[in-house]
Amino acid sequence: MVNEVPGGFKRCSKCAEIKPVNDFGKKSALRSGRKNECRMCLKDRNSIYYTKHKDTQEDNRKARTAYKNKNTSHTFANSEYIEPSVLSKDDETKFNALQRENEKKWKELAEKHGIKLKRE
């Protein structure tokens, strides 16, 4: 048969070239376990899509950044962290109080959203 492909090779659905199986990305959902498009064709398709939708992607990135900056008051990254080993005794009690206060805030936030904390 003319369309037969030797073992260890696969035909790209885009460029129709016969290439080694390693030139195709993995996709466990397919019977062959590999994508139908070779990596080079996929790269070309993705770069065309990126240039075509560059403005939209930039707008989405800006919107995500603005949302993140606006809504970071409840994240770990925004919470104050002080290294306990550099604190005096007086500061250590303040630190412990701050830590308990933060834990209380986290518990309230978790209860509000119906989330069970692992530390409880």
Image (cartoon, rainbow, N blue to C red):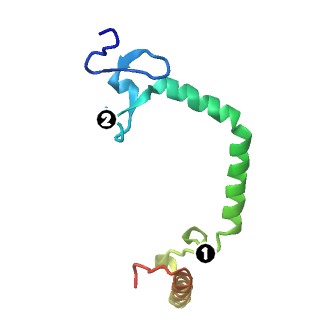
Q: Picture coordinates of residue 9 (x, y %)?
A: 31, 19
The residue shown at (51%, 29%) is 42
The residue lying furthest to the front in this view is: 1
Residue drawn at the location 44% of the way across and 80% of the way down = 117
At x 30%, y 14%, the residue is 4
Q: Secondary structure at mark 2?
A: loop
Which label sits on residue 109? none
Picture quarter containing residue 57? Answer: top right
Asked whether the viewer can see residue 85, the reply is yes
What residue is shown with label 2?
31
Residue at label 1?
Answer: 74
Is residue 3 left or right of 110 when viewed as pictured?
left
* In this rendering, position of residue 62 left or right of residue 4: right
Residue type at the position of mark 1: His
Horizontal side of 8 relative to 99 (left or right) equals left
Q: Is 49 rendered above or below residue 95?
A: above
Q: Quadrant of the C terminus?
A: bottom left
Quarter-of-image position of residue 1: top left
